[in-house]
């Protein structure tokens, strides 16, 4: 235990082994949905050749799930062991959708070609880390903008929690984009489970009970299993023609017929590194790589700051310990995700749930990683936990992260307005990258109009210019004659 304590600096960071284990458990249960959700996104869609992921003529969701859990487990363990940071990694949501609908379906493209682009993007980011560029960009960002990124991510994971639980929903019609529940009213047993889970966690936290978040997730799952057994609620999505608005969002919480299933890792290594260049042309391939890279580059920066702020691990400049190691592992994760045919892996903001439970070191990440590896064979058991039981943790952690907003000087418009745009655009656009980009551009513009252009770090100029290209990627494609 002494050696373990020294290696992970557990006592030095004010934690205990028990807290790290609890935090690792909570992080896993908060993000285990990716093992089920990623196959539903990338495993159910055909590429331009008409083949599903893996080359078959029918979806193979179990194989995609096994590879998703394997890559997430290995890279999360690597993060804990190398960077000693309570940060878990898995296939990036948003990135996997872009790979699926924005790359694999382009004329001439195959799944192997698309995953090859992900590998190339990861290699480029790794080079940027090893040359010090990515770390230098991170240090060039003003401290209060880093704080705004953390606060914005807090609101972002809050809206993710509400939407995934069905507490907030898209209206589908009219000028109002979202509404409470179904038709403006809360309805359905899954919503009851979500509210019960949220109240349990909040009550336990107020009373200072250790393990409040984990207890809440487990308790809500038990309630969900009982509710489903009695009420037969069923899933919210039955078929494209049939939906159940008051059904469970992803997993139907029922005890599985079997606990263990043999994993199939045949997807590993099925990528074509340069196939996309001949399929869609060099210019299009490079623009696709640029889009992937910019999203990966800044999402992780925001996530690790938010986790460090919540865990009180940042220094006076808002920098986490072992920043370069964190970024190296994250870059390797992008490569591994492409090589494993599960899309780019990246740092998960859901790690904040584990930090909220007390995680402060990489030991928590190793616990989470081991659980992901176990999920390759215990996938039926992982599928018991529904969205509605896991997402209350995101709401509570979003509140904790929101408290950092007091660190921003709201009387200084030069920082207050960029910070505001950073904070609100993350949840409103459902994109961490969009919030960071808007904040960076606004910061530079306001400095220029105030005659303080010389005070802007050169790397802030460069990254802001890249974000302008990122936001205007379609006009850039049109100008270059690229479809």
Image (cartoon, grey):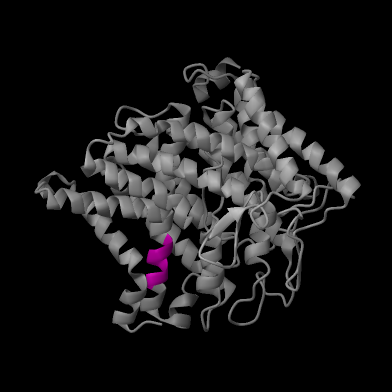
Q: Which residues are magenta?
A: 286-292
| Residue 381 image position (x, y, % from top left) | 79, 45
Q: Residue at x 37, y 71 (%)?
A: 287
Q: Residue at x 54, y 48 (%)?
A: 159
Q: 32 and 235: which one is in front?
A: 235
Q: Is residue 382 left or right of residue 45?
A: right
Q: Does 104 lie within the magenta span?
A: no
Q: 402 and 366: which one is in front?
A: 402
| Residue 50 image position (x, y, % from top left) | 65, 81
Q: Does 289 lie within the magenta span?
A: yes
Q: Residue at x 20, y 54 (%)?
A: 445
| Residue 361 image position (x, y, % from top left) | 52, 28
* Quarter of the image where the C terminus is located: bottom left
Q: How many marks?
A: 0
Residue 113 visible somewhere in the drawing:
no
Q: Is residue 187 above or below residue 47?
A: above
Q: Is residue 322 above or below residue 1?
A: below
């Amino acid at each position: 235990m002494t050696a373990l304590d020294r290696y992970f600096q557990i006592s030095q960071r004010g934690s205990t082994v028990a807290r790290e284990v609890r935090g690792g458990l909570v992080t896993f249960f908060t993000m285990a949905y990716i093992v089920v959700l990623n196959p539903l996104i990338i495993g159910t869609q055909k590429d331009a050749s008409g083949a599903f992921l893996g080359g078959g003529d029918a979806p193979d969701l179990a194989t995609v799930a096994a590879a998703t859990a394997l890559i997430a487990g290995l890279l999360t363990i690597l993060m804990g062991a190398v960077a000693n940071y309570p940060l878990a990694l898995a296939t990036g949501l948003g990135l996997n959708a872009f790979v699926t609908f924005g790359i694999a379906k382009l004329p001439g493209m195959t799944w192997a070609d698309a995953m090859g682009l992900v590998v190339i993007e990861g290699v480029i980011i790794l080079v940027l880390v090893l040359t010090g560029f990515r770390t230098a960009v991170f240090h060039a960002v003003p401290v209060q903008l880093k704080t705004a990124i953390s606060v914005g991510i807090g609101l972002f994971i809050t809206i993710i929690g509400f939407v995934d639980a069905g507490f907030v929903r898209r209206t589908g019609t009219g000028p109002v984009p979202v509404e409470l529940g179904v038709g403006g009213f809360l309805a359905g047993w899954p919503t009851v489970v979500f509210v019960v889970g949220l109240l349990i966690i909040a009550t336990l936290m107020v009373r200072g009970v250790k393990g409040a978040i984990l207890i809440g997730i487990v308790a809500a799952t038990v309630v969900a299993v009982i509710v489903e057994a009695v009420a037969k609620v069923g899933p919210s999505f039955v078929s494209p023609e049939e939906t159940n608005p008051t059904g469970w969002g992803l997993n139907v919480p029922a005890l599985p017929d079997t606990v263990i299933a043999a994993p199939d890792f045949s997807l590993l290594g099925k990528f074509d590194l340069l196939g996309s260049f001949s399929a869609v042309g060099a210019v299009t391939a490079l623009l696709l790589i640029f889009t992937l890279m910019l999203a990966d580059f800044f999402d992780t920066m925001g996530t690790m700051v938010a986790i460090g702020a919540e865990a009180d691990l940042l220094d006076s400049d808002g920098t986490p310990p072992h920043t370069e190691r964190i970024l190296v592992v994250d870059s390797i994760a992008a490569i591994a995700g492409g090589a494993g045919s599960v899309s780019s892996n990246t740092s998960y903001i859901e790690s904040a749930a584990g930090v909220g439970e007390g995680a402060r070191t990489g030991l928590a990440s190793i616990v989470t990683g081991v659980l992901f590896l176990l999920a390759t064979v215990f996938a039926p058991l992982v599928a018991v936990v529904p969205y509605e039981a896991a997402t209350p943790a995101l709401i509570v952690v979003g509140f904790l992260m929101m408290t950092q907003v007091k660190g921003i000087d709201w009387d200084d418009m030069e920082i207050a307005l960029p910070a505001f745009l950073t904070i609100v655009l993350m949840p409103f656009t459902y994109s961490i990258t969009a919030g960071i980009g808007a904040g960076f551009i606004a910061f530079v513009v306001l400095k220029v109009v105030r005659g303080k252009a010389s005070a802007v770090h050169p790397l802030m100029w460069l990254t802001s210019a890249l974000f302008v290209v990122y936001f205007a990627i379609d006009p850039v494609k049109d100008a270059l004659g690229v479809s």
